[in-house]
C-alpha cells in the first residue's frame, strides 16, 4: 500500500471525478466551477467545450517559466475565466453539452466533466384557432413542452416545430365539438407545476366568432365606401335643391300673373261706373 502511494507522489497522478450536472437559463449568466483547493499551486487549467451542436472550442490558462501566465481561447467572447471558474454571458441553448475541466499542479491533474443543460421557458396560450377548434400553444421552449388534454380524444393533433434558435414551438389542436369544457395541460422543466387552462367546446362559440369576423369585414367595407356614399348623397341633395329653386321661381311668376288678372276686372268696373255717372249728370 505504501509503495503505490510513493509512486503517485513521485510520478504525479490523474484524478477523474464524476459528471456534474449544471442547469442554466437561456439569456442569463452561467458559471461552471472547476474548484481545486490548491489554486495557488496551479500550473495550468484548460476547458474543453463540446457544444450541443457538435462545435468544439478550447479555453486554456498556463504559467510558463520566465514568461508568466498565458491564455489561449478560440471560444466565444461571451466566455471568460476567473480563477478556475468559467462564466458564460447571455447563455444560449447551443452552449449546452459536456464540458471538461483539467487542472494541473505539481502533484498531478484533476479532470472534471460538467454536463451543462440550458432551459428556455415557453410562452403558453389557449384559444380557438383559425380552424374553429381549441388550440393550445407552447412557443419558444427548450426542451420541447409536453401538451395533454382532459378529456382525452383520438382527434387531438399535435405538431412540434424547431426554430433556428434551437427552441421548439408545440401546437396541439382538439378537433372535436361535443359541447363540453376541455382543459389543456402544458408540462415543462421551467414550470414548478403544469400550466393549465380551460375552454368550452360549443359550436355556438365558433359561430359567434365567425359572425364577429363577418361583422368586422362588413364594417371595414362600410368605412371604405362611406366617402363615396356621402359624395353621392351630397350631389343628389344639391341637384334636388337646384330643381326646387327653379320650380319656386316659376310658381312665383304664375302667382304674379294671376294677381294682375284679378286686379284688372276691378279697375275696368270702376272706369265703367264713372262713365255712367257722367252721362246721367249730363242728362
Image (spheres, rainbow, N blue to C red):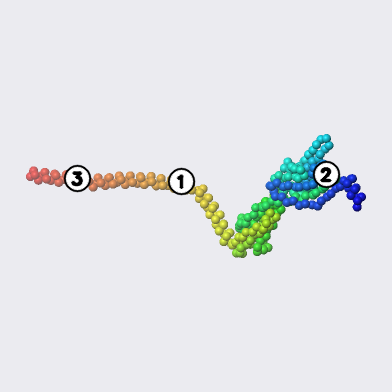
Which residue shows up at 39% across the image and 47% down it? 240
Measuring from the top left, give residue 164's x and y in whole percent.
Answer: 70, 47
In the rendered image, which residue does mark 3 sit on? 267
Q: Earlier in the sequence, mark 2 or mark 3?
A: 2
Measuring from the top left, give residue 63's x and y in whole percent.
Answer: 81, 39
Residue 145 vs residue 275, the one in the foreground = 145
Q: Distance of mark 1 from mark 3, alpha carbons?
A: 55 Å
Q: Mark 2 near mark 3, Cβ–Cβ under 8 Å?
A: no
Measuring from the top left, give residue 59's x and y in whole percent.
Answer: 78, 42
268 horizontally vs 73: left or right: left
Q: On residue 231, which mark appears? A: 1
Which residue shows up at 48% across the image and 48% down it? 226
Which residue shows up at 83% across the image and 43% down it? 105
Q: Nearer the viewer, mark 1 or mark 3?
A: 1
Q: Mark 2 near mark 1, Cβ–Cβ under 8 Å?
A: no
In the rendered image, which residue does mark 2 sit on? 104
Q: Quadrant of residue 238?
A: top left
Amino acid at each position: 500500500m505504501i509503495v503505490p502511494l510513493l509512486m503517485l507522489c513521485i510520478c504525479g497522478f490523474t484524478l477523474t471525478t464524476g459528471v456534474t450536472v449544471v442547469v442554466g437559463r437561456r439569456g442569463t449568466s452561467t458559471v461552471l466551477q472547476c474548484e481545486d483547493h490548491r489554486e495557488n499551486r496551479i500550473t495550468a487549467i484548460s476547458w474543453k467545450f463540446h457544444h450541443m451542436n457538435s462545435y468544439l472550442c478550447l479555453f486554456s490558462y498556463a504559467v510558463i517559466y520566465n514568461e508568466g501566465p498565458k491564455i489561449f481561447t478560440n471560444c466565444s467572447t461571451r466566455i471568460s475565466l476567473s480563477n478556475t471558474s468559467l462564466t458564460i454571458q447571455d447563455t444560449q441553448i447551443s452552449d449546452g453539452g459536456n464540458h471538461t475541466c483539467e487542472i494541473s499542479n505539481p502533484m498531478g491533474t484533476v479532470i472534471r466533466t460538467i454536463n451543462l443543460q440550458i432551459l428556455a421557458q415557453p410562452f403558453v396560450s389557449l384559444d380557438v384557432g383559425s380552424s374553429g377548434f381549441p388550440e393550445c400553444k407552447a412557443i419558444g421552449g427548450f426542451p420541447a413542452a409536453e401538451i395533454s388534454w382532459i378529456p382525452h380524444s383520438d382527434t387531438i393533433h399535435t405538431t412540434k416545430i424547431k426554430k433556428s434558435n434551437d427552441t421548439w414551438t408545440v401546437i396541439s389542436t382538439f378537433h372535436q365539438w361535443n359541447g363540453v369544457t376541455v382543459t389543456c395541460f402544458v408540462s415543462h422543466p421551467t414550470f414548478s407545476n403544469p400550466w393549465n387552462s380551460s375552454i368550452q367546446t360549443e359550436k355556438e362559440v365558433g359561430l359567434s366568432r365567425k359572425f364577429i369576423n363577418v361583422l368586422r369585414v362588413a364594417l371595414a367595407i362600410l368605412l371604405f365606401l362611406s366617402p363615396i356614399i356621402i359624395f353621392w348623397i351630397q350631389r343628389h341633395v344639391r341637384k334636388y335643391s337646384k330643381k326646387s329653386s327653379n320650380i319656386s321661381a316659376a310658381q312665383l311668376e304664375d302667382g304674379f300673373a294671376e294677381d294682375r288678372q284679378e286686379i284688372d276686372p276691378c279697375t275696368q268696373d270702376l272706369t265703367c261706373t264713372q262713365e255712367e255717372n257722367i252721362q246721367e249728370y249730363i242728362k
